Each structure stands twice: as structure tokens, then as C-alpha cells.
Image (tube, helix red, strand yellow):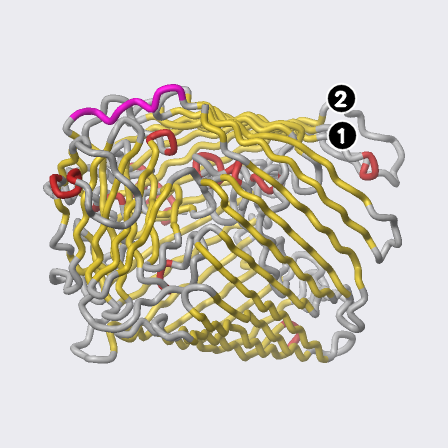
Amino acid sequence: MRIILICLLSIFFLRATGQKKNEGFQLFIKASTSPIEIDGIMNEDSWHQAAIATNFYMVLPMDTSMAKVMTEVRMTYDTQNLYILATCFHLLPGRYFVESLRRDFAFGKNDNFLLFMDTFDDQTNGFSFGANAAGAQWDGLMYEGGKVDLSWDNKWTSAVKKDDDKWVFEAAIPFKSIRYKKGITKWGINFSRLDLKTTEKSSWAPVPRQFPTASLAYTGTLVWDQPPPQAGLNISIIPYVLGGASKNHEARTSTSYRKEIGFDAKVAVSSSLNLDLTFNPDFSQVEVDRQVTNLDRFELFFPERRQFFLENGDLFANFGYANIRPFFSRRIGLGTPIEYGIRFSGKLDKNWRIGAMNMQTDKVSKDYLPRQNFAVVALQRRIFSRSNVGVIFIDKESMNYTPSDNPSLPVYSKFNRNLGLEYNLASSNNLWTGKALLLKSFNPEKRDKELSHAANLQYASRRLTVSWQHEYVGENYNAEVGYVPRKNYVKINPVLSYLFFPKSKSVLSHGPKVSSTYFFNDSFSQTDNESFLSYTITFRQQSIFTGWVAHNFVHLLQPFDPTNSKLDSLEIGSEHRWNSFGTEFYSKPQSLFTYSLLTRYGGYYANGTRLNLSGELGYRLQPYLSFAINFNYNDIRLPNPWNNKTFWLVGPRLDVTMTNKLFFTAFVQYNEQQDNVNLNTRLQWRYKPASDLFIVYTDNYFPEHFGIRNRALVVKFTYWWNI
């Protein structure tokens, strides 16, 4: 307990003050003197008159010198748009490296240029835009000081022009597509360049190599000649029409047809506050989740991909920890239709953020599920240089609902509420980060042990990383709109790692990492432990090798089938210990053929053994075609009644990008554990910025004879209309 108190005091009283690290890096921006055509050609007078950001600093392989690959960036604006032009020069001859023209590409596998904007100059939230060398767009919301949510999508235009000695990225970002403080004349800004031919990552304002170039603690300053223009009337209506058909062959039902309309709307209450509305939303075009072989005792987590929940979504979704989330938007509307939703979110000023959301779902008669209302309110206050304090309240209500006396029918709660308080620590130089969290749930039946608490503190320098985390979830803590897969435990998790930087032409860095995760019940009797030791070697060509060993202990608190195949279960109270070892290897991203291979072998439950092989094979015919196969193989050997079990999970994926506006994806997943083959294909035509035509076809098959389980076809048309 003394250790816990020390950790809490460290988090709450460590003052994270100080001037922004790169305050002296300034780029002056002035209004355009001529119209600008987005074509990737620097032939307008405004570009020749604009200030130039150049002399980039190397971030990788090492952050101790200037970049060898030259980059020049210019910015200007008019009453409607913010413009950027980046000239990315070549250092070595030869082709550039890209995966495809697919939007929101994988950063490490593409030559790319990215812009990071801190439009409130608070070093916490912002926007990111960019492109790879073939012209594929990248856009995302920035949160927690350096993370980018690429699921966000908005209206902007760009072009890439390639020459023998360079490639040029030019873009127009409407002021209506971003949020910023009224009257502000300084934005935090940084530019990032990745050149895979030289394996060099660089940035305009220098960033230590242990942090991403997206780190807003290290942005320079964009200095405006006058406050950015107000976006004026800023209302966007995004209607959709949809037609579809589906048939359940397994249940032998007749074909059902869909004819639906709905809309989203965005209303800018101010340049920093937004009101989002949705009526009868449909998310059929969202990519399917990547399946996994489930050998876990607890519920698995899948990220949110639906657009409505994303803008300022960190206010709600990032409250808490990975496995203690009081709010998880996927609890809303995946099994029930959403009637409507309202969300008000954004910045009140430089220090205050607010988010409020209300969602209404319809009843589901076959499940006796009543109409339900979901409401959440979050408020966040910045303190010190980059830290903040936040509070959240979540309310789930079953509307006009009285549980049935029939024991055979499902029973739903009348309400479930959660109240949370958290402190997020981020020092001015990002070396110290941490969080402290306290949650309380409220239910119709008042019970004790409805609290949850967690805290962590991390120090991350170039060589040394040290962290401590502990968690407590009470036996009766209940977050029905959250993700809390495990209850009634205390968790302690210390981590220590160190890096060496040898003078070697082939090895960039290497070093060990040790961690141990302990779980206890509320009487502090140990129930789980995983102790883990690994050693990682990072090569200069960006391939990575890791070897590891681990020891596991499990005292089962619930019956558990170690194969999750609906066979017999291990008994409550049984104890299991085993040792295992494994390797991980990721190939260099410059090759047209890339691969990764992860291995694991060792003990398992009930004195059994488990062999696991997983990885990915990928090939690209850049920039138009990318093909990848993900695979996961498990060979589990146990005593009766499980005996030997093997599970294959294979997922071939084909991405065809005819242009950066026309995409086709085919994704097949064979899951032996679930005895299913799933096919999902999607054609997307972005005929105008943020306006799309989708054609989505889905099939599910029996693996043995490829008999059809069910299939569906959806055609959806959306249009982004600015008023």
C-alpha cells in the first residue's frame, strides 16, 4: 500500500511546467496574393513569396545531426483555405517506396510527408494531414499529445507531382474542416518526412528519437500575419441513400431487402465547438474487424471505426485504461438500430474542453430488448504545461421498461451510471507521463465494492524507460457502456527497458526489456502472474528481431475451456504454471516483398503445450496493388477430453487502388476455431472530397464444402454538402 501511495503522490504532485521545447522554431505565414491551383506545381507567385521551412533535423536512425535528405515547406492562406506545399528532394537515385494509393496508409511502409497542427497551441490535440509519394492521402485527429486517429475523415484536396529529383505535395485544407481558437495568431506546427531509400525520418522542429514526430510537445510555431479568418456559416449536411439485399441460407429464410435514407450533420457553433447530428445512421461501409483466434479467458477488444463517434472521441473513449474503459462506443448500436444521436464537443478556450453525447436506440422485439438511451458528458481542464484533469458521467437508461417475471426471458437493467475522475500527466519535454483514475458505478441495487482505481507513471529517455502501473477493479463495479473485461482484482505491472547504440553499420540499437504483471484478489492472494524478459535488435534498414522468454502462473477463478471450443472446462481453483519462449521478426519495409514471423512454444494449461506461429506476407505492385496474407496457427496438446487441437486463421487481403479516389478491397478470413469463411469486398469511389459511392458484398461459408451460410449486398451513396 505504501508503494501505491508513493506512486499516487508522484503523479498528482509532479509539476509539469516549462516553456515549449521548440518555441524558437517559427514559420511566418501570410495571406496569398494570387489564386492557388492544387496540382503539385509551384508556379503561383504566392509560393515564391512564402517563407520556407527547411533545414530539417534527423530523428531516425539517430537524432544527433541534421537531415541528409532535403525538404522545403511553404504555407499560405486565403479566406477559405489553408494551403501547404512540400518539396521532397531525393538524395539517392531509384524509385520511391509506397504500398498503394489507399488512404491512411501505414506510416513505416511509405515514403511520405506529414503535417501536424496544434491549432490551440495546447500541445495536446490537433490535426494531421499528408500524403505518400504516390499521392495517397492521410488525415487524422490528434489526441493525447502525439497519437493520430486515422479513422477520422474530412473534406480537403491534395495533389502529388513527381520529378526526377523530387516529389511535391500540395494541399488545400478548408478552414471549415478544422477547429481552432478564434483570434489566435500562433499555432503549434511540425512537418515530418520519411525517406525509405535512406531509411531517414526527419522533422522541421527536432524531436528526440524515442518519441513520434507527431509529438505536439516538440512542435515549432506557425506565426500568422493576422488571426486566421473565421469560417463563417459552417454547416455540413451529409445525407445517404442505401439499397441492399441479404439472405440467411443457413436458417433458410427468404431474401430481405433494405431501402434506407438518413443523414449526418455538422454545425460549427464556433471555430472550436462543433455540434454533430445523426438520424437513422448506417455504418455498412465500415471495414470488417480483423478476426483473431480467441484463447483468452476474457472478452476481446475491437476498436471503434464509425465516423460519428470519432471527432473529439478521445474525450470519451480514452478516459481510463486499456482494460478499464467506462465508455466504449461499440456498446451502442452494433446489435440494435440507432434512431438518432447528438454530440456537442470541442474547445471552450485554450484550457477547457467539453464533450456531451446523447444516443437513442430502438427496441429489438426478438430479444425483448427495450428502447435505450445513452448519455455521456465529459469535461477536461488543462493544468500546468501539458497535463489535464478530466471528469466523465455516463448514463444508460432502459426506456419504459419493467423486467418480466418469466425466468426464461432475458432481463435488462433499468439503468447503469458511471462517474469518473482522472488526472493525465505529461511533462513539457514528454519525458514523464502518467495517469491517475477513480471510477464509481451506480445501479438500481446499491452494493459495495463498486469502485475502480488505477494509476501509472513512466519515464522515457533515449536509452532508459521505466514505468509502474497498478489497477484495482471492485467486485461489483459495473460499466455496461464500457469495456472492463475483468473484475475483482488488483494488478501491479512494473516495466524496465534499456537501449544500446553501437557504432555499427548494420545494427542501429539493441537492448533488453523486463516486465512482470501480477494479479491479486481483494485479499491480496495472487491469482495470475506473467514475467517477461525480451531482447530486441533494430537494424539500420529498419528490420527488427526480438527474442523472449516468459513464465506464467494462473489460479483459475472461473471455469475455463483452454481451447474455447465448447469442450470441458478446467475447475475453479486449479493452478497452472508454465514456461515459454519465442521470437519476432519484421522485415525491412523497403522491399516489394515484406514479411513478419512471430513464434511461440512452451507450456500451457493442464501441463499441456502450445505452439503458435503467426505473421504476415505482403507483396506490392506499387502504387496500384497490394496483396497481404495474415496467418495464425496454433497447435495445442492437452490431456483428455481436449487432446490435440489445431487452429488455423488465415486472412488474405487484396487492395487495388486504381487512383487515389477509386479503391477496391477484398478481404477473406478463414477461422477454423469458429468454423467459418468470411468474404468482404468493398468498392469505394470518392467522386468528390468526402463524398462516396460504396458497393459492399459479404459472404459467410461453411469451410468443409463452401456451402453458403449467408450473404448480403449493399449499395450506399453519400454526399457532403456545405451550406
Tag 2's secondary structure?
Answer: loop
Q: Residue at x 61, y 42 (%)?
A: 283
Q: Nearer the viewer, residue 569 or 403?
A: 403
Between marks 1 and 2, how big is the CA–CA gap?
8 Å
Within 10 Å of disc 2 (Cα), the crowding (few <14, some 14-19, many 20+) is few
The answer to whether 682 is drawn above or below residue 195 in the figure is above
Q: Position of residue 104 (x, y in %)?
A: 42, 52
Q: Nearer the viewer, residue 710 or 389?
A: 710
Q: Nearer the viewer, residue 625 or 282?
A: 625
Q: Residue at x 69, y 78 (%)?
A: 638
Q: Position of residue 590 (x, y in %)?
A: 34, 72
Tell me which segment is drawn in magenta: 226-233
When asked about the image quadrant of residue 561, the answer is bottom right
The answer to whether 222 is drawn above or below residue 679 in the figure is above
Q: Position of residue 45 (x, y in %)?
A: 15, 39
**Is there any visible trace of residue 446 in the rendered image?**
no
Q: Magenta stretch mostly in which secondary structure?
A: loop
Q: Which residue is mark 1?
A: 370
Residue 578 is left or right of residue 11, and the answer is right
For the residues bearing labels 1 and 2, Cβ distance under 8 angstroms: yes
Q: Residue at x 35, y 62 (%)?
A: 110
* Between discs 1 and 2, the one toward the N terminus: 1
Q: Which residue is mark 2?
A: 400
Identify residue type, mark 1.
Answer: Pro
- State yes or no: residue 7 in magenta: no
